[in-house]
Amino acid sequence: MTQVLEDALSELEPEIHVVLEKKSDLTETLKMVGNDPKAAPDMYLFAHDKIGVYAEMGILAPVTDILPAQELDAYMDNTIEAASYKGTVYQLPIYYETLLFMYNRRYMSDEKVPTTTEELYAYMQEKTKGGHYGFVEQHSTPYYAAGWINGFGGYLLNDQGVPGLNLPETEKALAYHKKFVDLMPGETEYATVNTLFKEGMAHATIAGPWLIPTVRESGMDVGIAPMPVIDETGTPISPYMGVQGIQVLKNAAEKKPEAVEKVLRVLMKDEVGIELAMASGCAPAKESCYEQESVTDDEVVMAMKETAENAVPMPNLPEMDVMWTVTGTLLTDVNMSGKDITESADKAEAEAFRLIENMK
C-alpha cells in the first residue's frame, strides 16, 4: 500500500516532496502534538472513527476548506457520511473496509451458503459437533455484535451521541443472536475464532478482509458471500464500515494550502484507488473506480462493496470511546454469563450515560 502511495505522489517531485512515515499510537500522539506544527504531521492516513475527537480539539481542517464541496460528489455517499462530523467533512476518503461472510468450500459448497440467518442457524445445528462448528464469530466483541444489532434497527450510539443499548430493537437483537452464540465456543477472542476457521474446525465465519490472505496461504479454498438476511427484519446483518482517508492538520492547511491541495488532488485520482485495490484488496471510496474491470473482477473488493450497501459507518463521535467498553460488558453478561437481557441492557445504558456525562 505504501508503495502505491509513494509512486503516485512522486509526480509532485521536485516541487513537493512527500515523506510517508509509519507511526505507532498515532491516536494518542495527535492528542498531544496536534497543535504543534514542529511535531505533528501535515496530514495523515487514518480511519475515520476518531474524527470527532480531533475536530473537537480543533486540530483538523475541513476538507472543504481545501477542495470545492462538489468534487466530493464523486465519492460513495456512505464514505462521505463517515468522514463528516457535525455536518463538516474532515477526511478525504481513500478506501473502506467491512466485515465479510466467508466460508470454507471444503465443507460448505457455494450452492449451500446460507442466505438467511435461519438457514445459517439450521446449518449450525447440523454441523456443530465432534469439535467442529458450523459458524463462529467474535460474538461478544462489540465491533462484531454491532452487525446483528444494526440489522434489527438498534444501535450502540446514534448520531446525536445518545446510547441505544436498552432500545427494544437492541434487546431483540441480543435475544435473537443468543441462540447462535449458544452454538459457538465460549471463547470469543480474535486468535481463537480465526484459528478455528483457518484450521478447518469452523466452516464459516464473519471476519475482516485482513483474514483472507492468511487463510489462503494455509491452502483453504475460501468463499465470500453476502451477509445473511435476518429473517426477523428482512435486513442483512449490517456491520460497521470503516473508512480510511486523509485528514489534514489545521496548521498545514493554513501555512501551505497550495501544497496540501496538490497532494490531495493526486490521491483523488482514480488510478490510486484502482492500484490500491489491485495491490491490497482495498475497496476504493470513489464510485468511478468500479468502472474498471480490474476492480470489479476482485472478489473481496466487490464483496465489501455489496456489504457496504447495508453497512453502518462506525460512529466517529468522541462518546464512542465509552461505548466499546460498556457494550463489551453487556455482551459478556448476556452471552457468557447468561444474565437477563433487559436488566443487563438497562444497567449498561445507565453506565453509558454516566460515563458520557463525565466526559463533559
Image (cartoon, grey):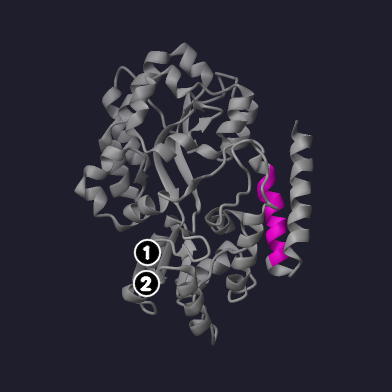
The answer to whether 61 is drawn above or below residue 21 in the figure is above
Q: Residue furthest top?
A: 255
Q: Which residue occupies 60% across, 49% down?
A: 155
The amino acid on which the numbered mark 1 sits, given as a three-letter code, is Ala
- Return the residue nearer the eye: 221 or 116: 116
Q: Is residue 201 visible?
A: no
- Return the residue nearer the eye: 164 or 53: 164
- Point out the image quarter for the C terminus: top right
Q: Is residue 181 left or right of residue 281?
A: right
User: What SS does tag 1 mark?
Assistant: strand
In front: label 1 or label 2: 1
- Point out the image quarter for the N terminus: top left
Q: Residues within 10 Å of mark 1 (few under 14, many from 20)?
A: some
Report how far apart the C-alphas of labels 1 and 2 lie in the structure: 16 Å
* Residues rendered magenta in the picture: 322-334
Q: Is residue 262 left or right of residue 63?
A: left
Q: Is residue 242 visible?
A: yes
Q: Which residue occupies 28% across, 48% down?
A: 278
- Return the residue nearer the eye: 355 or 150: 150
Q: Main secondary structure of the magenta part?
A: helix
Q: Which residue occupies 40% across, 68% down?
A: 115
Mark sitting on residue 225: 1
The amino acid on which the numbered mark 2 sits, given as a three-letter code, is Met
Q: Which residue occupies 24% across, 54% down?
A: 297
Mark sitting on residue 220: 2
